[in-house]
Image (cartoon, rainbow, N blue to C red):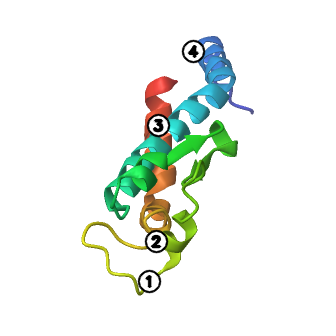
Amino acid sequence: MAETFEFKGLAKLTDRLRTMAQRAPAAFRDAWNEEMGIEVEEMKRRCPVDTGALQESIHLEGHGADIRVVAGGGGIGYAVVVHEDLEAHHPRGEAKFIERPLTESAPHLANRVATRMQSKL
Protein backbone atom coordinates (compact mmCIF):
# COMPACT_ATOMS: atom_id res chain seq x y z
CA MET A 1 0.00 0.00 0.00
CA ALA A 2 1.41 3.40 -0.99
CA GLU A 3 1.60 6.11 1.61
CA THR A 4 0.52 9.63 0.75
CA PHE A 5 1.94 12.86 2.09
CA GLU A 6 0.43 16.27 2.17
CA PHE A 7 2.73 19.27 1.95
CA LYS A 8 1.15 22.30 3.53
CA GLY A 9 2.38 25.63 2.29
CA LEU A 10 3.73 24.26 -0.99
CA ALA A 11 2.07 27.02 -3.03
CA LYS A 12 3.59 29.67 -0.76
CA LEU A 13 7.03 28.05 -1.05
CA THR A 14 6.70 27.87 -4.83
CA ASP A 15 5.77 31.57 -4.98
CA ARG A 16 8.72 32.48 -2.75
CA LEU A 17 11.15 30.48 -4.87
CA ARG A 18 9.78 32.06 -8.04
CA THR A 19 10.22 35.54 -6.53
CA MET A 20 13.76 34.74 -5.42
CA ALA A 21 14.67 33.44 -8.88
CA GLN A 22 13.37 36.64 -10.46
CA ARG A 23 15.32 38.81 -8.01
CA ALA A 24 18.51 36.73 -8.08
CA PRO A 25 20.23 38.38 -11.08
CA ALA A 26 19.84 41.88 -9.63
CA ALA A 27 20.75 40.66 -6.14
CA PHE A 28 23.92 39.06 -7.52
CA ARG A 29 24.88 42.15 -9.51
CA ASP A 30 24.38 44.44 -6.51
CA ALA A 31 26.17 42.10 -4.09
CA TRP A 32 29.09 41.63 -6.47
CA ASN A 33 29.42 45.38 -7.06
CA GLU A 34 29.35 46.06 -3.31
CA GLU A 35 32.01 43.43 -2.60
CA MET A 36 34.20 44.69 -5.42
CA GLY A 37 33.81 48.20 -4.01
CA ILE A 38 35.33 46.89 -0.78
CA GLU A 39 38.17 45.37 -2.79
CA VAL A 40 38.81 48.69 -4.54
CA GLU A 41 39.09 50.45 -1.18
CA GLU A 42 41.70 47.88 -0.12
CA MET A 43 43.56 48.36 -3.41
CA LYS A 44 43.63 52.11 -2.82
CA ARG A 45 44.90 51.55 0.73
CA ARG A 46 47.78 49.43 -0.62
CA CYS A 47 48.55 51.59 -3.66
CA PRO A 48 51.91 53.38 -3.58
CA VAL A 49 51.33 57.11 -3.17
CA ASP A 50 53.46 59.95 -4.43
CA THR A 51 50.99 62.51 -5.77
CA GLY A 52 47.87 60.42 -5.12
CA ALA A 53 46.87 60.42 -8.80
CA LEU A 54 47.34 56.67 -9.26
CA GLN A 55 45.50 55.87 -6.05
CA GLU A 56 42.55 58.05 -7.04
CA SER A 57 42.43 56.52 -10.51
CA ILE A 58 41.51 53.06 -9.17
CA HIS A 59 37.84 52.41 -9.87
CA LEU A 60 35.32 49.90 -11.18
CA GLU A 61 33.83 49.90 -14.66
CA GLY A 62 30.87 47.79 -15.73
CA HIS A 63 28.31 45.88 -13.69
CA GLY A 64 27.79 42.37 -12.43
CA ALA A 65 29.90 39.67 -14.06
CA ASP A 66 31.35 42.22 -16.50
CA ILE A 67 32.92 44.40 -13.81
CA ARG A 68 36.56 45.45 -14.23
CA VAL A 69 39.08 47.13 -11.94
CA VAL A 70 40.75 50.03 -13.74
CA ALA A 71 43.84 51.97 -12.67
CA GLY A 72 45.79 54.62 -14.49
CA GLY A 73 44.72 56.16 -17.76
CA GLY A 74 44.17 59.85 -18.37
CA GLY A 75 47.85 60.75 -18.25
CA ILE A 76 48.76 58.15 -15.62
CA GLY A 77 50.69 55.80 -17.85
CA TYR A 78 52.85 54.36 -15.09
CA ALA A 79 50.19 52.23 -13.36
CA VAL A 80 51.45 48.92 -14.78
CA VAL A 81 55.08 49.70 -13.91
CA VAL A 82 54.20 50.64 -10.32
CA HIS A 83 51.99 47.56 -9.97
CA GLU A 84 54.52 45.09 -11.38
CA ASP A 85 57.89 46.37 -10.09
CA LEU A 86 58.62 44.15 -7.11
CA GLU A 87 62.05 45.72 -6.64
CA ALA A 88 60.82 49.30 -6.15
CA HIS A 89 60.78 50.69 -2.62
CA HIS A 90 57.62 52.55 -1.72
CA PRO A 91 57.52 54.51 1.56
CA ARG A 92 53.77 54.03 1.45
CA GLY A 93 52.03 51.20 -0.40
CA GLU A 94 53.25 48.14 -2.24
CA ALA A 95 53.59 46.52 -5.65
CA LYS A 96 50.77 44.21 -6.75
CA PHE A 97 48.30 46.51 -5.00
CA ILE A 98 45.48 45.26 -7.25
CA GLU A 99 46.45 41.60 -7.53
CA ARG A 100 47.18 40.82 -3.88
CA PRO A 101 43.85 41.93 -2.38
CA LEU A 102 41.97 39.88 -4.99
CA THR A 103 44.18 36.83 -4.45
CA GLU A 104 43.71 37.07 -0.68
CA SER A 105 39.94 37.51 -0.99
CA ALA A 106 39.38 34.81 -3.61
CA PRO A 107 38.73 31.95 -1.14
CA HIS A 108 36.09 34.01 0.69
CA LEU A 109 34.55 36.15 -2.02
CA ALA A 110 31.79 33.73 -3.06
CA ASN A 111 30.57 33.42 0.54
CA ARG A 112 30.65 37.18 1.00
CA VAL A 113 28.60 37.68 -2.17
CA ALA A 114 26.14 34.94 -1.14
CA THR A 115 25.66 36.55 2.28
CA ARG A 116 24.91 39.90 0.67
CA MET A 117 22.53 38.25 -1.80
CA GLN A 118 20.61 36.61 1.04
CA SER A 119 19.79 39.99 2.53
CA LYS A 120 18.57 41.22 -0.87
CA LEU A 121 16.33 38.24 -1.58
Q: Position of residue 16 (x, y in %)?
A: 59, 17
Camera-nearest label, 1 or 3: 1
Q: Which is nearer the N-term, disc 1 or disc 4?
A: 4
Q: Are marks 3 and 4 in contact (CB under 8 Å)?
A: no
- Secondary structure beneath disc 2? loop
Position of residue 116 relative to residue 43, above or below, is above
Q: CA distance from mark 2 to mark 3?
A: 22 Å
Pointer 1 with pointer 3, Cβ within 8 A: no
Q: Residues within 10 Å of mark 3 (few under 14, many from 20)?
A: some
Which label sits on residue 96?
Answer: 2
Q: Dot 1: few (<14), some (14–19), or many (≥20) neighbours within 10 Å? A: few
SS label for mark 4: loop
- The residue that mark 3 highlights is 34
| Residue 116 to residue 82: above or below | above
**Amino acid at circle 1:** Leu
Which of the labelled discs sits on residue 31, or is there none? none
Which residue in the structure is indicated by mark 1? Answer: 86
Please, what is the three-letter code of the amino acid marked with disc 4?
Lys
On screen, 71 above or below 98? above
Q: Which residue is mark 4?
A: 8
* Disc 4: CA contacts within 10 A as few (<14), some (14-19) or many (>=20): few
Marks 2 and 3: which is nearer the front? 2
Q: Residue at x 52, y 76 (%)?
A: 84
In three-dimensional space, the C-alpha distance between marks 1 and 2, rounded to whole angstroms, equals 8 Å
Report if the CB atoms under discs 1 and 2 are less than 8 Å apart. Answer: yes
x 42%, y 51%: residue: 53
Q: Secondary structure at mark 1?
A: loop
